[in-house]
Amino acid sequence: MALYTTDLLILGSGPAGYTAAIYAVRAGVDVTIVSGNQEGGQLTMTSTIENFPGFEEISGFELMEKMKQQAIKLGAKFINDHIVEVDFAHRPFICSSENGHSYKAKAVIVATGSSAKWLNLPSEKKYLGYGVSACATCDGFFYRNRTVVVVGGGNSAVAEALYLATLAEKVILVHRRHKLRADKILQDRVFENRKITVEWDSVVEEILGAEEPKKVTGIRIRNVETDAVREISADGVFVAVGHQPNTDIFRGNLVLDSKGYIVTHENSSATDVEGVFAAGDVKDPKYKQAVISAGSGAIAAMDAINYLDTVA
């Protein structure tokens, strides 16, 4: 067990966290990044990225590794650990990790991101990154003129289906109920789109695939009303049953909205606790794009730098 002391502690190692570290350390701030339980964040699950400025094509893992190495080269300290408890009631702030370490900091940037909700199928995990995705805007391009499945019935799922319909030849929306939960205007667009068909009252029981090369070939669904089981051919499966921000440890410490996202001041990354800032998907339920998270990290760093100047 160890005690680490730093001026600025950054929780999370996705685009927001690494960008915040780069900006802060260049301003002369002593910065420590604690990785979280998924180093590099959700982006590491994206096999190919073509919409991050400066890179025509790069894997999510490689992009995060480049950001990490840039932050470290500039002077940020990186520790592979996961915070499980925070104390924002006293100053300096104390964060405790699952490894028994303690981190003391004058300021904290929370960039712990969000996690996609999954179907919890073994086959889903097996083909993750090989045809299974939770981000149509990240991976939809690779299914141009092909057949894809979207699982879900809310706004996120319907938006994914509509977006994929601009690229794919056919989109199959699988929903466990007999009507969608999405806003009516989105439902109308789905029903009017000839490329989209809906499998009602159905759940995905297994994602089917091949081994050499590893890829998705279809799904097996079960009708919850009749128990009838059948297989559908498809080239990709997009799981859109929602996201959840990684904010459990901040309940009671920071103000969260009804969905668990951290609430920040208008036009600022500042939370309700002076000296604690938030960046990236942990405060953004809408966009969930790497470039936007990176920009959010830069804003949080500048806000934190200004705060540290006032308490120096």
Image (cartoon, rainbow, N blue to C red):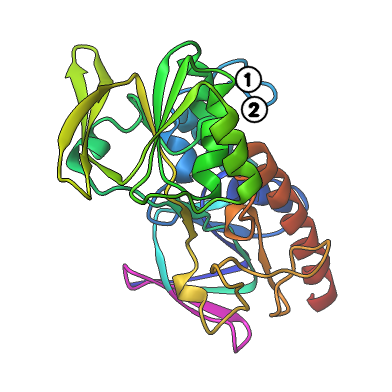
Residue 261 among those drawn in magenta? no
Q: Residue at x 51, y 33 (%)?
A: 161
> Taking 20 as reference, is 84 left or right?
left
State the residue in front, 183 or 249: 183
Q: Residue at x 39, y 62 (%)?
A: 82
The residue singled out by tag 2 in the image is 52
Q: Position of residue 40 (x, y in %)?
A: 47, 43
Q: Tags 2 and 1 in contact by the CB under 8 Å rule?
A: yes
Q: Quadrant of the N terminus?
A: bottom left
Q: Which mark is residue 144?
A: none
Along the viewing direction, whichever of 247 and 173 lies nearer the viewer: 173
Above or below: residue 206 compared with residue 227? above
**Which quarter of the figure has residue 148?**
top left
* Image position of 4 (left or right of 228): right
Mark 2 surroundings within 10 Å by alpha-carbon count, few (fewer than 14), some (14 through 19), many (20 or more): some
Q: What secondary structure is found at the residue carrying circle 1?
A: loop
The answer to whether any part of residue 71 appears in the image is no
- The boundaries of the magenta stretch are 85-102
Residue kind at label 1, given as amino acid type: Phe
The residue drawn where x is 18% and y is 41% is: 122
Total number of numbered discs in the rendering: 2
10 Å neighbourhood of mark 1: few (<14), some, or many (≥20)? Answer: few
Residue 93, how many percent across, how many down?
Answer: 58, 79
The residue that disc 1 covers is 55
Q: CA distance from mark 2 to mark 1?
A: 6 Å
Residue 17 percent location from the top left of the image:
59, 51
Which of the 4 quarters of the picture holds residue 204? top left
- Taking the image as shown, residue 102 lies to the left or right of residue 282, namely left
